[in-house]
Amino acid sequence: GAVVSQHPSWVICKSGTSVKIECRSLDFQATTMFWYRQFPKQSLMLMATSNEGSKATYEQGVEKDKFLINHASLTLSTLTVTSAHPEDSSFYICSAQDRGYYEQYFGPGTRLTVT
Amino acid sequence: TQLLEQSPQFLSIQEGENLTVYCNSSSVFSSLQWYRQEPGEGPVLLVTVVTGGEVKKLKRLTFQFGDARKDSSLHITAAQPGDTGLYLCAGADNQFYFGTGTSLTVIP
């Protein structure tokens, strides 16, 4: 149980284009989903927290107009990187949490490369 | 901002050796999780501890939650190359806070 999928697993895009990453909880209802960014051999940097049906809460320094998050259902959240630039290249990971439980369950991550 | 400090940050050991990773904070958490992450993949939950002083074992891994619920340790006995990865602790109260991470390399 507690499986989270992410799609795509990797994507290469040109500078100025937008990229959408999907995060799905496959066998439980995720009342809360989290989006993280990670650099090599470093810990996770929380970008935003989203609850189903409400606007995402962004961490300080994260541009909400650049990183659009939609948590449209209890099993799906999307992150859209708009007008991507090379500095947005990174490993993006989502996680999902069921109501009343401590743990977060992570997706396999998406490697974004902006050329 | 609550900070969970992990030590050491990097660790490279020979197969068969023992090691301990520490996760320390000045804040009290209602629970603490340990994750392992392999390159190019998402973190995988290893264990959750919720009671001060609690000890949990997962094969060669032993996890301990401090009595005051501010710190935790992960001890690996007879490390194997398959243990290589990034180990992350995470504390939870009303929010979730990740530790700074420990990158472990076990050399065959």
Image: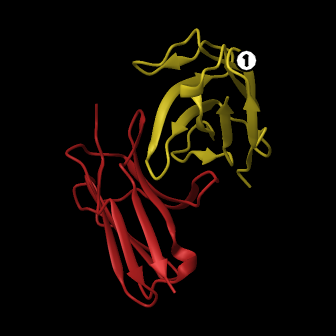
Q: Residues within 10 Å of mark 1 (few under 14, many from 20)?
A: some
Q: In which quarter of the view is residue B9 placed?
A: bottom left
- Tell me, by letter, which chain the rendering colours red: B
Q: Position of residue B97 (x, y in %)?
A: 39, 40
**B3 or A65, nearer to the observer:** A65
Residue A94 image-quadrant placement: top right
Q: Residue at x 63, y 53 (%)?
A: B40
Q: Which residue is drawn at 40% across and 50% down?
A: B31
Answer with left or right where residue A12 lies relative to residue B78: right
- Residue A34 coordinates in the image, percent (x, y): 57, 32
Q: Which image quarter is the N terminus of chain A in? A: bottom right
Quick check: can you spot residue A110?
yes
Considering depth in this image, is A61 or A69 the residue closer to the camera? A61
Residue at 46% in and 87% down:
B15
Q: What element carries label 1?
A: loop
Instruction: Identify the subunit bearing mark 1.
Output: A
Q: Name the residue under label 1.
A: A18
Left or right, A51 with reference to B67: right
Q: Which amino acid does label 1 sit on?
A: Ser
Q: Decide if residue B76 is in sight here.
A: no
Q: Residue furthest front?
A: A115
Q: The yellow chain is which one?
A: A
Task: Please state the horizontal and vertical placement of residue B53, each as a whole percent of the image.
Answer: 29, 66
